[in-house]
Amino acid sequence: MKRSLSILPLAKRITTSAFVLFLTVSFLFVLVRIAPGDPSQKFISPKLSPKLVEKVKTSFQLDKQIHVQYLSFVKNAATGNLGVSYAFHRPVVEVIFDVLPFTILFAVSAFALQLIAGLLLAVFAFHHNQKIWDKLLSRGSMFLYAVPSFVSGLLFIYVFSVQLKIFPSSGIKTVGTLESSFFLLLVDYTKHLFLPVLVLSLTGLPVYFKYFRENFEENQKKLFTLYLRANGVSERKILLSHLIPNSLNSIIAYAGVDLGILFSGALITEVIFSLPGMGRLTINAILGHDYPLIVGCTLTAGILIIFTSLLADLIRLNIDKRLIKGLLN
Amino acid sequence: MKGIRFSVFHFFFFLLLTTIAFRLPLLGNTAMLLASYLGLLFSDYRTALDQFSLNMADYFCSLFLIIAIPVFLYFKRKKLPTLKTFSFLHYSVTVIFYIFLFAPVITNDNFDFQKDISVTRLLPPFSSIHALHLKSDTKKPGRLNDFLSLKRNVVKNSFDDKIVFYDSLRQNKSNVVCFQNGLLISLPLSSIDLLNGKPKISMRHFVLGSDEFGRDIFNRIIYGTRISLLIGFCAVILSLIIGVVLGFLAGFSGGVTDVLLSRLTDLFLSFPIIFFIILILAFFGNSFISVIVVLGFSGWMSLFRIVKGEILSLKTKDYFITAQQLGLSGTKLLLREALPVIAVPVIVNTVFQFGNVVLSESALSFLGLGIGNDFPSWGAMINSGQEYLAQAWWMIFFPGFAIVLTLITVNDLGRKLAHQFNPRMHA
């Protein structure tokens, strides 16, 4: 009985995810096809003979009927065969896998930073409940929430790179760093990634802070806290083993989507710091009308987001069994 | 809301008086222009219509509002509540609203005005540049010419060939030599406006500095406020209509419609919507209208969810069932019975959505996919400042400040409204 209860919502959840993914692919196909401009034109100069033009068109599968294109499109997307990028002249999958490690490193470090800093600040603010620190922090987080990353990013570059010259302003490694010395390489990477990670996490930090702070407040009013207090459990223990775990539920749901969006590329931060990540790859593909790469990037982003939010839901289900009922309805 | 209005209106008055004090000549000219235009309208109808422009109408509107608002407030003064609270939010909302209304009167030049780039480019804040005035053409008599010269005084063009900016000046017997950052310009004395035998010199102030084309950043920020707010209003209204109608449909009819619409919402929500926005704008071209439409179409999901949830709970209420039994049509049910009840969460959500749209618009402009170069936009200003980061911090600092101030204000407003309407929510 228990087993069937846990499998059914799981199956339902995964089916929904798959359906959303399928819709995304179809939507993408329609969008790319109805877009004005023939992508093959970019590879065809007037000097080419008509025969060669045909050959180029056939190689990009642009000469067939629209429904044939759609079927092959879905089939290719499902099997991971995403074609050859027009701009890079390499398979799309290869191009994406080139930037994926960096993107994941970047996203995970920013995610970890904002989550941990948000939690610590919320604990600090909660400790100083309704005192000056609490109010300052909540004001500050509201201010931070209103600062877009292209403003904070450029200001940080101005202060730390242009004026103080502490951190480099762009790229991922200095030209001419000794490849052999692992330690130097690590220092170099850290130096290059410090500002971008900081900027990226600053946009998410206020959200986590606010979630944690409000959940603490809410849980503190509940009867179980009162009971624990009445039994003389220390405040520290209440916070660590009761308030924080009880606050996690909604935060995990938010974090799942957030991490997925971070994986799919921190568009503006990557553009400002010229980092080789998914976001910049995607926008370059879009601006260059590189259709296979656009499809590949958006599909990867969709898969990552759907996957992380699925993961988050599974974690939540594992923590709080009451949610299963909600999913079943 | 009692008590707020009084203080806000006092502050509004203060702003109005400051503007009037600084721009009295302009306002006088505008009044004269209006009189001259009306005269022209009665004497030569066709030419008057030809001469009509939106910019001119803008100035007339500002003049009208400057007179009408104090008069209106004076007659309504008994009904204005008394002063109680006073906060940052009230100031900032007033300032932003004021700038939105009176942009043409606050600024003293066209937002695209540029002249003598070698002297005026990348000026730091609070710098002033000397300017020589060339003699204007001799006035021709006639009502139309009077009108045209007045119009030139009021409605500024993006170019003025009667002004010469310079670094330093040397005067000979017969001509004047201007130095423009190493460039020499020699002008005959006869072509220059003179004052007591000496060239008439005025100062042009760049309060917040100038950008790489010598355009005044202050003017561009003021007009950028208008553009941002306008895009915000239009896009939010679009998403409001879509969200409320779809949400009502899904909640009211249920069944297949509900499932389909909810899945569609999931699809939209489970995706980094910014990529789709960029995709659409990059493929179909970016313009004022397309930015509004795309942002409007990408922001209805949260409204949809709220409206659907509210309608679902509303459907079980007795009065709603009665209204349904009476045979009211779907539109009437939505407009008369449902909307007044769900207005509070919808309004609060709309305010937050407005902030999102303003942010997205500036982000798009920053990426070069905004409303184009015809209008100034904060994001585009920051984008162009990126290149001159080492030399001109003011090119990104002031537009960035404008964005942050607007977003803080809008978010704060949303929170305050939510609190006002539903105090228990944050109690």
Image (cartoon, coloured by chain):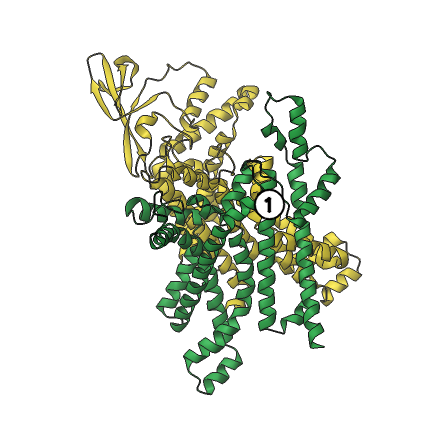
Locate residue A114 relative to residue A30 in the image: left or right.
left
Q: Residue at x 62, y 31 (%)?
A: A40
Q: Provide the secondary structure element on which disc 1 rests.
A: helix
> B60 or B157, which lies in front?
B157
List the residue tagged with mark 1.
A296
The chain displayed green equals A
Q: Is residue B401 visible?
A: no
Q: Give the x, y percent position of residue A228.
A: 48, 84
Judge whether A81 appears above or below A240 on screen.
above
> B384 or A2, which lies in front?
A2
Q: Residue at x 68, y 27 (%)?
A: A54
Locate residue B167 relative to residue A34 in the image: left or right.
left
Q: Residue furthest front?
A: A180
> A90 or B402, which lies in front?
A90
Using the image, name the chain to which the residue with label 1 belongs.
A
Q: Give the x, y percent position of residue B308.
A: 67, 59
Locate residue B94 relative to residue A297 in the image: left or right.
left
Judge whether B181 appears above or below A17 on screen.
above
Query: Please, what is the three-letter code of the amino acid marked with disc 1?
Result: Gly
Q: Give the x, y percent position of residue A123.
A: 42, 70
Q: Is residue B64 visible?
A: yes
Q: Give the x, y percent position of residue B219.
A: 40, 36
Task: Give the colour of chain B.
Answer: yellow
- Picture mark count: 1
Task: Decide: few, some or many residues near mark 1? Use Cα within 10 Å; few <14, some 14-19, many ≥20.
Answer: many
**Which image quadrant is residue B396 in?**
top left
